[in-house]
Amino acid sequence: MKNSICETVEDEVEELSVHPYSKSELARAYAPEIGDRSALNRLSRWMHRNEDLYSALLQTGYRPTQQIFTCKQVGLIFEYLGRP
């Protein structure tokens, strides 16, 4: 019996793993339908509005000017925002 299209597509979707991501790469994963700058701004707003997440990120040494999220920071973002 053939797989339905939905089952095939669902099998192809991979969950993002926890490893270092550039800010733009992670932002695009959360918002692939909008432009890069808009995706970055959206992710930044989500992080700042979630006080627990932002506090936890600061405890890892996060700086708003950094370009790459560490594994620990990505793990926290996934924990608080869910995986893209």
Image (spheres, rainbow, N blue to C red):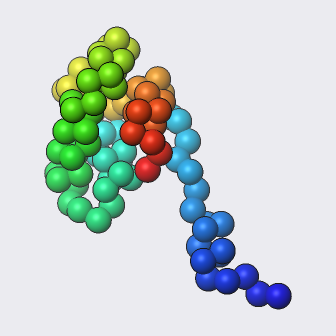
Q: Position of residue 11 (x, y in %)?
A: 65, 66
The residue at 47%/45% (across/down) is 83
The residue at 36%/18% (across/down) is 56
Residue 33 placement: quadrant: bottom left
Q: Is residue 74 above or below residue 6?
A: above
The residue at 47%/32% (across/down) is 79
Regarding residue 49, the answer to whether it shows in the image is yes
Quadrant in which the N terminus is drawn: bottom right
State the residue in front, 2 or 67.
2
Residue 78 placement: quadrant: top left
Report the number of numbered marks: 0
Q: Is residue 64 above or below residue 9?
A: above
Regarding residue 20, the answer to whether it shows in the image is no
Q: Position of residue 66 (x, y in %)?
A: 25, 27
The residue at 27%/30% (across/down) is 50
Q: Residue furthest bottom?
A: 1
Q: Residue furthest right?
A: 1
